[in-house]
Amino acid sequence: MNYTKSIISGIIALVIIVVGFFSSTSVDSGYRGVLLQLGAVKPTILTEGFHFKLPFIQTVQPIEVRVQKEESSQTAASKDLQMVTAMVAVNYSADPGAVNKLYQEIGLDYRTRIVDPAIAESLKAITAQYTAEELISKRPEVSAKVKEMLASKLTKYYMILEDINIKEFAFSEEFNKAIESKQTAEQNALRAKRDLERIKIEAEQKVAQAGAEAEALRLKKQEVTPELIQLKQIEVQEKALEKWDGRLPSVTGGATPFIDVEGLSKK
């Protein structure tokens, strides 16, 4: 009898242990728990930590809510029908408050089913609004519009877009050569324009200098008067007398210079 009671007690204890084990669950950090009751999704979302559940009836499906990164190469066409390849990096996460709906409507493979197609569709839709050159010069604007569209798409499927980065736009070799040729032509045109401006400035400077010289010569001619000429002649004669020793030259090669001695003696 005691042996039978011991067996029954052992069975009861084992059942309690098993029930207790299957009546509890825990959700790891960075996850949320989707509560399933006989396979049906319940409205309750389990947060991080320890929780109780109905054994054998309820199960918990963990869903990661930490930021995830998706990096891929996408091909699209520009407004002027140039093929462009973009390297896109996207950071996103599952909405912690809607993981039950995410699991119920999409499942665990939401990255392949939703995220990747949404990135490709958003990039193609936005790049089609810009020419190839504008995609290069307006990349921040393009990135902002792609982010806005992608965020709207992911929100519909209970996901949050954290950030997007378009690392580069790559074009065909023919287009790259065309861009290089255009840049060279623009640089040559700019250089020619600067040379023309320099020549124009130098010509204006020469004209101004010539005008100044002509004006100076005109002023000098206005200053030459008969009185000035007579004064200069007197100054020359005075300098000659200062150097004369009072003797006339014994031999001359021409006329003797006239010196007004009487006029000088009156001074």
Image (cartoon, rainbow, N blue to C red):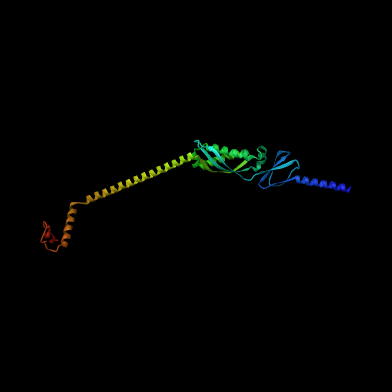
Q: Residue furthest right?
A: 1
Indicate the position of residue 111 as horizontal and vertical percent values: 62, 40
Quadrant assignment for the C terminus: bottom left
**Which sits in the foreground, 56 or 154?**
56
- Quarter of the image for residue 76 reads top right
Asked whether residue 158 appears in the rendered view, the answer is: no
Q: Residue at x 66, y 42 (%)?
A: 97
Asked whether residue 110 appears in the rendered view, the answer is: yes
Indicate the position of residue 138 as horizontal and vertical percent values: 50, 41
Q: Residue at x 85, y 47 (%)?
A: 7
**Which sits in the foreground, 221 or 56?**
56
Indicate the position of residue 106 as horizontal and vertical percent values: 65, 38
Question: Seen in the image, is 230 located left or right of residue 170?
Answer: left
Labels in figure, total: 0
Give the vertical position of 263 relative to 102 (above or below): below
Q: Residue at x 74, y 41 (%)?
A: 58
Q: Residue furthest front?
A: 173
**Which sits in the foreground, 106 or 240?**
106
Indicate the position of residue 164 as horizontal and vertical percent values: 57, 43
Q: Residue at x 23, y 51 (%)?
A: 220
